[in-house]
Image: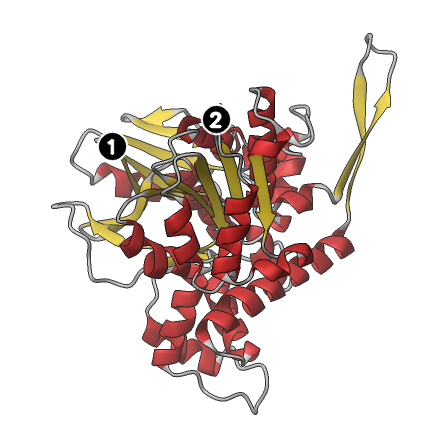
Amino acid sequence: MISRPDYLNQLISWKDKNDFIKIISGVRRCGKSTLFQLFQDHLKKGGVSDTQIININLERAEFSELMDWKKLHDHVKSTVLPDKMNYVFLDEVQMVPEFQKAINSLRLEKNIDLYLTGSNAYMYSQKLSTLLSGRYIEIKMFPLSFKEFVSAFNPSKFLTPILFDIFREYGGFPDIAKLIDIEYQEKDIAPGAKILDSVRVKTSEIQIYLDSLYNTIVAKDISLRTGIDNVSEINRIVKFLFSNVSHPTSFNNIANVVNSEFKFFPTDKNVYVSKVQKIVDALLESFLFYKCDQQQLKGKELLRADSKYYGVDSGLRYYMLGGNKTIDGGHVLENIVYLELLRRGNRVYTGRVRDKEVDFVTEKGDNTMYYQVALSVDSEETLKRELASLEKIEDNFEKTILTLGVIPQKSYRGIKIINVVDWLLGE
């Protein structure tokens, strides 16, 4: 299993604080069930017995009889040990109608420490938040960061750029890493030395995997949630959002474009604005996309302007748009940076200062930071343009340009310039 230390440490910090339900949220197959396994291993190493751990994955056939909330509740109550702390893990709990009734009752038991996963934010916003009144904490999980992705291969510095190209194209879902073979050859140049022999990406298997993943999200988290069974309408909007990453857009704009440029067949009906909004809301709730609002940097108010939408994974983007790795490389890089900023616990906005746009404004505690993302700042003209937006900001918070290209110098008038791969690796 690929280590997920940041998420695991969060769970460890909440262990035995059973006044709070711990909820792991995130897109399907981002690693929520594996995180449960890692945490259960940690519990066992700390002396917790197997009988104190109740693990129920509600998508598995053997638990199909627990799809009634009362049966789920009674099953857990009958399984727990009365004289010890019990750690109860309910995977994909939103599968159970009215599951919140079981959860609300179980959380009152003094010997139950309760952990949930879910692949749809609708369950929290509509069903749990009012009922529990702040008695739960949410750990937001994403597919692998580049640092986590790299950890699956233990690579050399030589291999890191190759892995980044693979990560950009095929994304960071944990199962993708299993479809990449890296082979080394022993050499006599030094004791134990190895050199890279080959990197093999199983592209056919990856396409099949991403197809299965996307269709599962559409079927279980979007169509079921919205009642919209016309998959063509959903696909048109998804393709538009992936193709429009990093560009501000509105529901009216989405409707206009998908009805003109994203009609797959002449018989496709128009998608009206009300349905666009319904589908986009479901895409956000299924964690397939994230919405980034715009902030006016002078005055710090949020603007009622069009928002940007970023996809949860670059592999799904290339899958939906035909796998062309040359499509909008700068925008894909911006998407990767946006997700990393969220992973690091920031509130993230896109910024505007006078007539200039700042790619990202982050807030964490009392600290604010500003970022520009550029595929390259090799040319003087490009560098000048990227610096201009940050130079117009009048405060003294840290300002950074992240780039994949050659860095002419490490800072200009206090604005840092950092290689984005090094930044993703925390270096």
Which corner quadrant of the image does residue 186 belong to?
A: top right
Residue under the point 74% across and 45% down? 179
Amino acid found under the numbered disc labelled 1: Gly
Q: Is residue 241 above or below residue 418?
A: below
Q: Is residue 320 above or below residue 349?
A: below
Q: Is residue 335 above or below residue 194?
A: below
Check disc 1: other Cα within 10 Å, few if <14, some if 14-19, many if 20+: few
Question: What residue is shown with label 2?
Answer: 426
From the image, which quarter does the N terminus lie in? top right
Q: Position of residue 117 (x, y in %)?
A: 50, 48
Q: Which residue is the extreme one toward the left?
A: 299
Q: How is the image coloured?
A: secondary structure
Check disc 2: other Cα within 10 Å, few if <14, some if 14-19, many if 20+: few
Assign a secondary structure to mark 2.
loop
Question: What residue is shown with label 1?
Answer: 365
- In the image: residue 284, left or right of residue 367: right
